Image: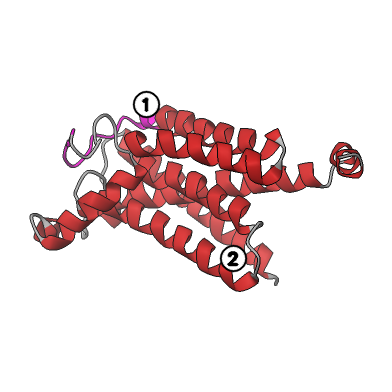
Amino acid sequence: MGNKKIGIIFLTILLVIIGIWSIQVTIGIVPLTDRPTREFVDKLSNTTISDLFRNITELGSSTFLIPFVIVIAIVLLLLYKHWFPALLFVSSIVLTHVLNVAIKMATTRERPSISVEAHAEGYSFPSGHSMIPMVCYGLVAYFIGKKLPSSTAKIAFQSACGLLVLLIGISRYVINVHYLTDVIAGFTLGFILLMGSVYIHKKFEHSPTRDVEKSNP
């Protein structure tokens, strides 16, 4: 069995689990995954680790991401000399935000704690700080990675982006504004949307229209 098929099976299983979690949180049942993990978060409260992750979480907040997305969109216009990558980048992030809000409104799960300072208000499932940075920084890794001069630089850059996404998502759990299942669900849904955006770009790159544009710069 190829890696692609294994990946599809793994994502399918995760989606089924997330579906079960969404039903549970909607009717007020705490998923089994969240029950043994709350004590760990309580122990991290008011520690150096929680302070560190409180700073990291800002990299997934709207106050940082909105200007960041605008700057990256401009960079993509300059790098690719075409409107499509920038449009796809911005629209993918907006779509992810809309979908995240829609699911939150459907499940209406209360957060473990509210923090205005950490941009943690409203409902909890799934984590927007897991879902949106997955698409945002994932597309940054994809688009800019394609323009890097060597495979080593590409791997290093994309690995750094991946680590950043992981840390931002985990930060929401560590600072106790999301349950662990919120974060896992956000990562999974964000990854699926990211792969969809990459697929759309690859289709565009190999479309007959794009071939004509390349031959007539």
207 vs 67, left or right, is right
Q: In front here: 45 or 28?
A: 45
Residue 51, given in percent of the width and then of the height, sits at 15, 55
Labels 1 and 2: the sequence-earlier one: 1
Q: In front here: 142 or 193?
A: 142
Residue name at image x 44 percent, y 39 percent: 68
Local secondary structure at mark 2: helix
Q: Amino acid at mark 1?
A: Met
User: Quick one: quadrant of the C terminus?
Assistant: top right
Residue name at image x 39 percent, y 40 percent: 22
Q: Which residue is mark 1?
A: 105
Residue name at image x 42 percent, y 33 percent: 66
Q: Which residue is mark 2?
A: 154
Local secondary structure at mark 1: helix
Residue 46 visible somewhere in the drawing: yes
The crowding category of the residue bearing disc 1, from other C-alpha atoms within 10 Å (few below 14, some 14 to 19, many at least 20), is some
Residue 150 image-quadrant placement: bottom right
127 vs 176, left or right, is right
Q: Which mark is residue 139?
A: none
Q: Main secondary structure of the magenta part?
A: loop
Residue 164 image-quadrant placement: bottom left
Residue 126 visible somewhere in the drawing: no
Q: In front here: 129 or 117?
A: 117
Residue range of the region highlighted in magenta in the rendering:
104-116
